[in-house]
Amino acid sequence: MAESFFATLKTEFYYRRVWPTKAGASKAVGAWIEDRYNRRRRHSALGQISPVSFELQHCNQPAAALQAA
């Protein structure tokens, strides 16, 4: 799992830029992980939807449906 994550990070983000400082690269990588990878990437455990979409679906369910589950 970790190997897949780092391959995605390098391919989609890290190798596409030139980093003048290590601190700048570290800060940008953290921002990419938080914004792009964690919130937008589809997850198999959630039925191939993003965490944001999953949360919105959950919040939009009627209260009766949540109690029945």
Image (tube, rainbow, N blue to C red):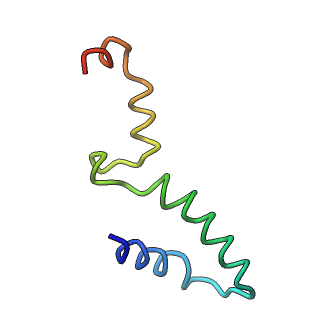
Q: Quadrant of residue 63?
A: top left
In the rendered image, the quadrant that contains the C terminus is: top left
Residue 15's spot in the image, x, y percent?
54, 85
All told, the count of numbered labels is 0
In the rendered image, the quadrant that contains the N terminus is: bottom left
Residue name at image x 74 percent, y 88 percent: 20
Residue 56's spot in the image, x, y percent?
45, 33
Eyeballing the image, is 66 above or below 8?
above
Residue 43's spot in the image, x, y percent?
34, 54
Q: Residue furthest front?
A: 2
Residue name at image x 42 percent, y 41 percent: 53
Residue name at image x 36 percent, y 77 percent: 3
Left or right: 41, with 32 as reference point: left
Q: Quadrant of residue 61?
A: top left
Residue name at image x 54 percent, y 64 percent: 33
Near-viewer residue (23 or 20): 23
Eyeballing the image, is 60 above or below 48?
above
Residue 57's spot in the image, x, y percent?
39, 32
